[in-house]
Amino acid sequence: AQSVAQPEDQVNVAEGNPLTVKCTYSVSGNPYLFWYVQYPNRGLQFLLKYITGDNLVKGSYGFEAEFNKSQTSFHLKKPSALVSDSALYFCAVRDPSGTYKYIFGTGTRLKVLA
Amino acid sequence: NAGVTQTPKFQVLKTGQSMTLQCAQDMNHNSMYWYRQDPGMGLRLIYYSASEGTTDKGEVPNGYNVSRLNKREFSLRLESAAPSQTSVYFCAIILAGSSYNEQFFGPGTRLTVL
């Protein structure tokens, strides 16, 4: 069965430091991977995606993610964290079996400390 | 969240009452989704509709029904609400162009069942 795991419920990082939010996946076939961010009392907003091509993808607000096929990971990164990056982050994978389903991880709360 | 509207924003029901959550999109996209978000559970797919007139079950369809009568609207109905259905409900669409595109979310409906 397809699945997505975000092993950390919360990540704390000091402002200005690099941040990493982890995601691993289990799918049969080529994965289509996404990161979303959710601010309080809002819907999810798209950050970036990997479909094919370069393993390093760049997205909104200075975020990037690295696709690693051998480790089945798609970790979200940012070189220098901002307090305004504090939010809930979700990794998701599109079911490659031909349906239109997307499978979400349980989310990681990022807290950037001033 | 321009383009995807959800009504109502908040709702309190008593156990056994029924209600319909409405979702409408003005972007002429085919695929629409209903998710529920619960703490520690991430987003779980309730139902989705790949195109007008078609609907399919997601991960947690029990206790819900959906209706996709036209391209713009996708409604979610609770026939007999239960406290376990207390959650935040999000409607989402896939942006046009490719089936590998990201989802675009509405602002959510916060439902409490007493």
Image: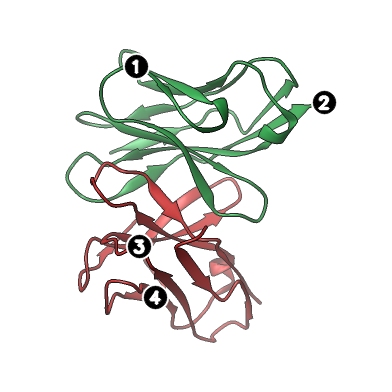
SS assignment at label 4: strand
Closest to the camera, between mark 1 and mark 4, is 1
The amino acid on which the numbered mark 3 sits, given as a three-letter code, is: Met
Colour red, chain: B
Q: Which residue is mark 1?
A: A55
What residue did someone put label 4 on? B75
Colour chain A appears in: green
Number of labels in the image equals: 4
**Local SS, label 1:** loop
Measured from the top left, where is residue B97 in percent x and y?
24, 48
Query: Dot 2 corresponds to which residue?
Result: A114
Q: Is residue B68 above or below residue B45?
A: below
Q: Is residue A50 above or below residue B40?
A: above
Q: Are marks 3 and 4 on the same chain?
A: yes
Residue furthest left as drawn: A98
Name the residue furthest right: A114
Q: Amino acid at mark 1?
A: Asn
Q: List the single residue furthest toward the bottom.
A: B17
Q: Residues within 10 Å of mark 3 (few under 14, many from 20)?
A: some
Q: Quadrant of residue A93?
A: top left
